[in-house]
Image (cartoon, helix red, strand yellow):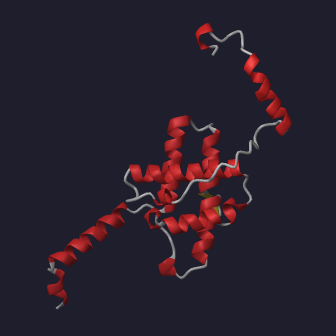
Amino acid sequence: MAVLRGFNPEIAAIRNTSNQQREKSYTILDAINMWLDRTRNKVGTESSNVNQYRSTFGWVDKDGRPRGTLLTYLDRYNRERPAPKRIHFIHEITPLWLQQFYDGESFADLSISTKRQRWGTVRSFFAWLHKVGVIPSDPSAAIDRVKDDGYWGNIPFTDEQYQAILSNADWYVDERVKDGERQ
């Protein structure tokens, strides 16, 4: 009977699809390394982007321990669950899992501007993976981006100083600005 079921075209098609998907499966670390390699190729190895991306997504240290925000969260997630519910491949990450990652302690203590920047990086990572065919859909697309609170936390002035700069900026035009561009 089992041999006859093996000839069933529906079962064969499902088995073939499953085998193809397994062949195309990338571990999360493989996907992160592809992103980092892409970044190094685009901006060079000395760019601070590479270090920031490593910090956000992670790496495995020489002792085999995961480091970085996403891999550390994933490691904790997997240790708390039985084997069948663990996440090993990048295509297994769902919008719900990403929302829990975002809502968890990984982003809790960050300023709004840092949170927006980091979440933008996470969204870019998954959008790129989807674009190049590593994952069938982008799980981050379902999650709203971080709202801007209007606070300029990265400006080294008080609110009063910043307002004074803006209110006086309209009268100053740098001499090097071309006449047609002064307005």
Residue at 17 percent across and 85 percent down: it is 5
Residue at 60 percent across and 76 percent down: it is 79
On the question of residue 52 being in view, the answer is yes
Query: In the image shown, does 83 or 150 lie closer to the viewer?
Result: 150
In percent of width and height, residue 54 lies at 61, 51
Residue at 63 percent across and 72 percent down: it is 76
The quarter holding residue 2 reads: bottom left
Q: Quadrant of the N terminus?
A: bottom left
In percent of width and height, residue 15 lies at 26, 74
* Residue 68 vertical placement versus 149 (above, below): below
* Residue 78 vertical placement versus 171 (above, below): below
Query: In the image shown, does 4 or 134 lie closer to the viewer?
Result: 134
Residue at 60 percent across and 14 percent down: it is 181
Q: Residue furthest bottom?
A: 1
On the question of residue 33 being in view, the answer is no
* Residue 84 vertical placement versus 109 (above, below): below
Q: Quadrant of the C terminus?
A: top right
The quarter holding residue 69 reads: bottom right
In percent of width and height, residue 28 lies at 50, 61
The quarter holding residue 77 reads: bottom right
Horizontal arrangement in the rendering, residue 118 relative to residue 124 (left or right): right
Query: In the image shown, does 139 or 160 lie closer to the viewer?
Result: 160
In percent of width and height, residue 20 lies at 30, 65
How many numbered dots are placed on residues in this image? 0
